[in-house]
Image (cartoon, rainbow, N blue to C red):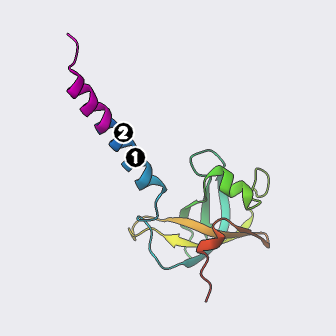
Amino acid sequence: MAKSLPSRIFAGVAFGLLLVTGAYAHHGWSWAEADQVELSGTIREISMAPPHPTLQVETRNDGSTWRVELGNPRLTERSGFVEGAAKAGDPIVVLGNRSLDRNEKRMKAVRITVAGKVYDIYPERIRTN
């Protein structure tokens, strides 16, 4: 039995809204604190895969591992951080916005410094005091 035109339109609109809100939630900054913090440690793992390249960073002070999200692949590449720019074991300093959930060791990087080389992922968002 064929669906009626109004129910098809409704289903299409609902699906479209679901996609848009999911993309907004993923790409927005609403999950992160407004204040920027610095995190120092050692890179344990690098993933350059979409939707966002990520780093697993082990901190020096307590040995915990943080998930550090970079910009989308094109934005990250534009900063100069490309495949081979860093490797596991490299020292890193991350400037970024940590998760609002203090139990979650996750942050969105605006700048990373790997072995002394600076990569401005989101230069327009960098706030230095």
- Start-end of magenta stretch: 1-13
Residue 20 position, x and y percent, is 40, 46
Q: Residue at x 75, y 64 (%)?
A: 90
Q: Which image quadrant for residue 41?
A: bottom right
**Observer-nearest of 81 and 16:** 16
| Residue position for label 1 | 20
Q: Residue at point 79% right, 73% down?
A: 116
Which amino acid lies under the numbered mark 1 shown in the image of this protein?
Val
How many numbered circles does the render carry?
2
Residue 63 found in image quarter: bottom right
Q: Quadrant of the N terminus?
A: top left
Residue 89 vs residue 126: left or right? Answer: right
Horizontal side of 96 relative to 34 (left or right) equals: right
Depth order, front residue of 6/68: 6
Q: Are marks 1 and 2 in contact (CB under 8 Å)?
A: yes
The answer to whether residue 98 shows anywhere in this view is yes
The quadrant where residue 60 appears: bottom right
Helix, strand or loop for disc 1:
helix
Q: Specify the quadrant that holds the C terminus.
A: bottom right
Question: Farthest residue toward the bottom?
Answer: 129
Q: Secondary structure at mark 2?
A: helix
Decide: few, some or many residues near mark 2? Use Cα within 10 Å; few <14, some 14-19, many ≥20: few
Instruction: Please tell me whether residue 57 is drawn above or below residue 126 in the rendered image.
Output: above
